[in-house]
């Protein structure tokens, strides 16, 4: 690139000297300027095409975690929590221990199971005794049925107590173990060691999210609601990655206005395999939707703006370059819609265009 600029500068100086020695009424630069083979190899050459006109709309938005892949852990029992090792931002695996709650409720559940099992043993012995006495004629059938019913009831009580304890983790030592239900990152943490907690606490202790895909929630003002549709393609950029464009689709429109800021929310789901996008990042969302109109379209790099006029450099041959004025209709990404004296297929210079334009006008 540096060599190209030096070459053009020397060429420009030479043309200036030649023009000073020539008849001012003759245009020498345009006739004498020729693109050399070496310079041609460094230039980017683009073509004029016909494309459907795309309307674009830029929205503000924010990255958030995918609510469909989030696990919120609430306290199931009261007590004091200890043994917390997982911190905000840590990656945890399904079943990983996050902390332990020393709970009187868990001790009660364990005690209920022990009591039920003890009653079951007693009922079993009574049933065995009743069966022996019935066989010996010392007990009636009614006594045997009563003993069997008592045994069935105590067995049901053991099953119930065991199920209740399993719901709370199955620990029989008075401890409730907080475990991660999914693989993911801890995106919220509202608990510390030695804190006393209650089951009626409305706040979750941990929020765990699988960040392999994220949501971008964008704001649409009332005046732009008609320009946003379900399925519209969008390009997203962030402050953290200004040169990287993320592509997505509007997959949900919240058909109501936020009562606070009077905007309608739309949602875009983005794959995030390398975890580049973080919750709470600000994002710029460009919405694209095609119209039924077509127009001449060129890469934006081919456009030159000089003296309040737009131009393109039409490359017919290495010795014939035509400076062609054009009018801009609009821009979508790196494509510009134009009208002017160019036709589809025309070759345009897309790099160092301003330097070549200066050389042609020297």
Image (tube, rainbow, N blue to C red):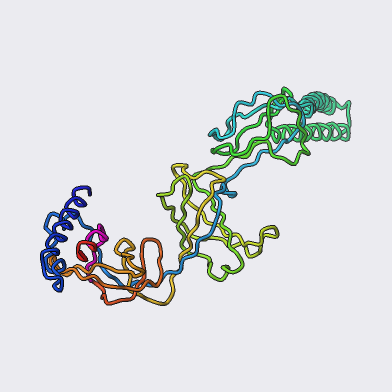
135 vs 278, left or right, is: right
At x 62% / y 32%, what residue is drawn? 179
337 vs 195, left or right, is: left
For the C terminus, the quadrant is: bottom left
Against 150, residue 12 (above or below) is: below
Q: Return the x and y of residue 160 as percentages of the image width and height.
A: 76, 35
Name which quarter of the figure residue 146 lies in: top right
Does 348 lie within the magenta span? Answer: yes
Against 292, residue 12 (above or below) is: above
Q: Count of labels shown?
A: 0
- Magenta stretch in the rendered image: 346-356
Residue placed most toward the observer, 14 or 238: 14
Residue placed most toward the observer, 36 or 281: 36
Q: Return the x and y of residue 6 as percentages of the image width and height.
A: 19, 50
Residue placed most toward the observer, 212 or 350: 350
Name which quarter of the figure residue 279 lies in: top right
194 vs 93, left or right, is: right
Q: Return the x and y of residue 79 as percentages of the image width and height.
A: 76, 28
Q: Return the x and y of residue 275 as percentages of the image width and height.
A: 47, 42
Against 214, residue 151 (above or below) is: above
Residue 124 visible somewhere in the drawing: no
């Amino acid at each position: 690139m540096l060599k190209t600029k030096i070459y053009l500068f020397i060429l420009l100086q030479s043309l200036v000297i030649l023009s000073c020695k020539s008849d001012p009424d003759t245009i020498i630069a345009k006739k004498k300027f020729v693109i050399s083979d070496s310079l041609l190899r460094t230039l980017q050459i683009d073509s004029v095409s016909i494309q459907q006109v795309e309307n674009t709309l830029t929205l503000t938005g924010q990255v958030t975690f995918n609510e469909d892949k989030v696990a919120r852990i609430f306290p199931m029992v009261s007590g004091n929590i200890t043994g917390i090792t997982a911190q905000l931002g840590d990656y945890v695996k399904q079943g990983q221990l996050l902390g332990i709650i020393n709970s009187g409720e868990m001790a009660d559940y364990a005690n209920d199971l022990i009591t039920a099992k003890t009653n079951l043993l007693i009922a079993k012995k009574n049933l065995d005794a009743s069966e022996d006495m019935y066989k010996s004629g010392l007990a009636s059938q009614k006594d045997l049925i009563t003993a069997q019913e008592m045994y069935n009831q105590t067995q049901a009580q053991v099953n119930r107590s065991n199920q209740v304890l399993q719901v709370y983790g199955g620990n029989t030592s008075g401890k409730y173990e907080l475990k991660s239900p999914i693989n993911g990152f801890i995106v919220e943490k509202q608990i510390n060691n030695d804190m006393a907690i209650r089951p009626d606490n409305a706040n979750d202790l941990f929020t765990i999210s699988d960040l392999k895909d994220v949501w971008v929630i964008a704001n649409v003002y009332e005046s732009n609601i008609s320009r946003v549709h379900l399925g519209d393609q969008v390009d997203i950029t962030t402050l953290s990655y200004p040169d990287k464009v993320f592509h997505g689709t509007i997959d949900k429109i919240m058909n109501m206005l936020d009562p606070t800021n009077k905007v309608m929310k739309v949602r875009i789901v983005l794959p995030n395999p390398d975890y580049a996008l973080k919750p709470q990042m600000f994002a710029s969302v460009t919405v694209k939707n095609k119209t039924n109109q077509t127009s001449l379209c060129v890469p934006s790099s081919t456009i030159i703006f000089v003296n309040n006029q737009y131009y393109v450099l039409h490359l017919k041959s290495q010795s014939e370059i035509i400076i062609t004025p054009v009018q801009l209709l609009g821009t979508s990404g790196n494509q510009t819609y134009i009208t002017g004296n160019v036709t589809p297929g025309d070759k345009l210079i897309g790099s160092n265009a301003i330097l070549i334009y200066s050389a042609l006008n020297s």
